[in-house]
Image (cartoon, rainbow, N blue to C red):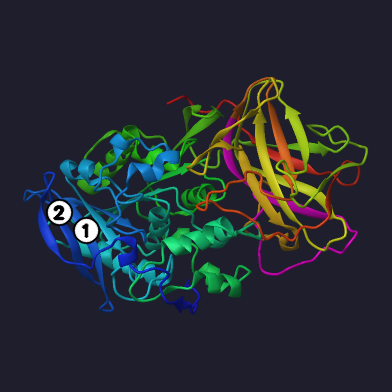
């Protein structure tokens, strides 16, 4: 099935390469740190446009396996440890030759690989107009894979590696199945730009999306006008379809790494990618740490090498013994154990309803017969926002692993719309909130998050399940003032162990659950909220939280 044809908007660049410390391209080759380093290598795409790459490869004559890192951040920008201080990257795990979120050549080249860092079309000094996660970019990436697979120094088997955008771009090119693409390692990358970045549950992001457009916007030509396109396409239409991955066409072997911690950015899309790709040989690893640090830590790099050694170099190694799924069951910040499973989502999951009780402010396995409610002031006027809260205390050890969903009856007093912000927290037996790593930079995160603009509550009947409601996002359905409406809120996946006496807490409020002043973090400052929100419970309004309980989780790795 062909993708819809969409017309992209372009604008003058938001910055010049020179203003970002990037010098004009000048090809040169030499031996640096025991590697053959070629800078500003010209690659000509199928339409004649010339783009540039840096290639790090072994000095000898033996053919190397190419690893391509494709992203708009700039091949010349080193992955300085100070850029990642909140992300806990160990300075020993990167070098000045490591591009942002890309493989470290100082490790991979001595192992017989060639690291290829690319400036895509229209970024920095590469020719053409820059577009992002577009059909054109996927075709360009295809061309570079074929270029790398046919160079005299190449062994003809190309791998893809990198974090965030460098993973998201892998989803797009892999669906085209370039002949020389032999393996991919998408490490935490979104796959549905609308649902996972720009509009969380229909609530527009006001911080990360504008910021990231600036980060991507250095060019000597033109760049895609993401801000203008976002204004023109408030609903999920063909434009946003063109920026979403088509997983079913992907058959390349894949080692997919996700985290529970990138709520609001990469968690959902990475797991959707693993579920959706048709690759007959695929593995999933889900951790509970910070993505940058986890990508570069030696144990993770060793697993990457096992994967690439097998598929790019033909080495018979322990990958044949890898379980299909390995996931971390978190207990608290930086404390958890890895377990092996056969599939994702875990087939034996027991989806369990915890009913909201507004009178007792609790969650219960039994549906309350009496009607109740909790209400809160929806406009954030204090450091600690007003909210509705419901708690469930576990009587025995319980592992909650997978998608949660809030099915609730809500009311917006005096308004025809409302934005709901939903958070899941863990409390220890003493009643203290247990923090987790969050969005690569923070240490005070929740278990999981969800969002909903209630006027966009219409579900997609094909994609939705009870445990993962997926919204159509194709029209606005205002609330009739004074009415109570039923909603389903997708809560992003998580994996958490609760001991006896510990609690799961559901928070519902009208503003951000986890606030941040960082610009490289999403915010939802343009809400529709006014007045009070009411969450109705019990009686004829049986609101409940669906949680995924997994018994006898797999053997510890």
Q: Is residue 492 magenta?
A: yes
Question: Which residue: 57% across, 25% down?
Answer: 552
Is 528 above or below relative to 399? below
Instruction: Give whichever of 408, 466 is nearer the camera.
Output: 408
Question: Which residue: 52% across, 63% down?
Answer: 210
- State whether residue 77 appears in this view: yes
Instruction: Give whichever of 139, 531 is nearer the camera.
Output: 531
Q: Is residue 38 magenta?
A: no
- Picture quarter containing residue 33? top left
User: Helix, strand, or loop for circle 2?
Assistant: strand
Question: Which residue: 32% across, 47% down?
Answer: 79
Residue 111 image offset from top left, x and y in percent: 18, 41
Q: Is residue 485 left or right of residue 24?
A: right
Q: Is residue 290 left or right of residue 500?
A: left
Q: Are marks 2 and 1 in contact (CB under 8 Å)?
A: yes
**Magenta residues, start to end:** 468-496
Residue 141 image offset from top left, x and y in percent: 32, 65
- State whether residue 284 appears in this view: no
Residue under pointer 1? 54
Q: What residue occupies the far left of the structure in this picture?
A: 61
Question: Which residue: 47% across, 36% down?
Answer: 289
Please tell me which of labels 2 and 1 falls first in the chain.
Answer: 2
Local crowd at mark 2 within 10 Å, few (<14), some, or many (≥20)?
many
Q: Is residue 281 left or right of residue 147?
A: right
Q: What residue occupies the far front of the structure in this picture?
A: 19
Residue under pointer 2? 37
């Amino acid at each position: 099935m062909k993708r819809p044809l969409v017309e992209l908007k372009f604008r003058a660049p938001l910055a010049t390469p020179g203003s970002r410390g990037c010098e004009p391209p000048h090809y040169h080759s030499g031996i640096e740190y025991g590697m053959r380093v070629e800078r500003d290598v010209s690659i000509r795409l199928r339409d004649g446009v010339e783009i540039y790459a840096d290639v790090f490869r072994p000095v000898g004559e033996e053919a190397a396996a190419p690893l391509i890192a494709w992203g708009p951040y700039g091949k010349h920008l080193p992955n300085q440890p100070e850029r990642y201080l909140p992300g806990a990257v160990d300075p020993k795990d990167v070098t000045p030759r490591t591009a942002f979120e890309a493989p470290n050549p100082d490790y991979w080249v001595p192992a017989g690989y060639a690291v290829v860092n690319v400036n895509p079309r229209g970024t920095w000094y590469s020719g053409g107009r820059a577009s992002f996660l577009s059909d054109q970019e996927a075709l360009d990436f295809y061309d570079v894979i074929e270029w790398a697979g046919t160079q005299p120094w190449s062994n003809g088997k190309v791998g893809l590696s990198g974090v965030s955008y460098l993973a998201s771009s892998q989803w797009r090119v892999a669906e085209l199945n370039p002949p020389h693409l032999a393996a991919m390692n998408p490490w935490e990358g979104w796959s549905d730009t609308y649902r996972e970045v720009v509009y969380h549950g229909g609530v527009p992001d006001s911080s990360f999306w504008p910021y990231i457009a600036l980060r991507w916007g250095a060019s000597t030509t033109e760049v895609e006008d993401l801000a203008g396109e976002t204004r023109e396409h408030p609903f999920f239409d063909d434009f946003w379809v063109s920026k979403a991955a088509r997983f079913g066409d992907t058959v390349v072997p894949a080692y997919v790494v996700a985290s529970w911690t990138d709520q609001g950015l990469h968690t959902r899309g990475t797991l959707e990618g693993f579920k959706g790709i048709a690759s007959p040989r695929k593995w999933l690893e889900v951790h509970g740490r910070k993505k940058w640090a986890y990508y570069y830590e030696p144990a993770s790099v060793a697993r990457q090498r096992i994967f690439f050694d097998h598929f790019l170099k033909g080495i018979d190694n322990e990958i044949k013994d890898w379980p299909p799924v390995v996931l971390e069951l978190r207990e608290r910040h930086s404390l958890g154990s890895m377990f092996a499973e056969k599939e994702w989502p875990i087939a034996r999951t027991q989806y369990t309803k915890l009913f909201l009780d507004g009178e007792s402010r609790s969650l219960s396995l039994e549906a309350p017969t009496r009607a109740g409610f909790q209400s809160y002031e929806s406009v954030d006027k204090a450091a600690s926002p007003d909210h509705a809260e419901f708690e469930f205390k576990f009587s025995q050890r319980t592992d909650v692993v997978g998608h949660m969903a809030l099915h609730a009856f809500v009311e917006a007093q005096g308004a025809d719309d409302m934005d709901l912000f939903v958070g899941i927290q863990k409390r220890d037996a003493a009643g203290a909130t247990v923090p987790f790593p969050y969005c690569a930079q923070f240490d005070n995160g929740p278990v999981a998050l969800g969002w909903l603009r209630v006027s966009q509550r219409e579900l997609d009947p094909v994609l939705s399940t009870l445990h993962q409601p997926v919204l159509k996002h194709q029209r606005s359905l205002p609330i009739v003032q004074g009415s109570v409406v039923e909603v389903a809120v997708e809560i992003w996946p998580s994996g958490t162990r609760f001991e006896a006496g510990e609690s799961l807490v559901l928070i519902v409020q009208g503003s951000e659950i986890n606030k941040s002043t960082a610009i490289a973090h999403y915010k939802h400052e343009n809400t529709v909220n006014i007045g009070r929100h009411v969450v109705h419970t019990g009686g004829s309004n049986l609101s409940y939280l669906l949680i995924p309980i997994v018994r006898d989780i797999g053997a510890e790795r």
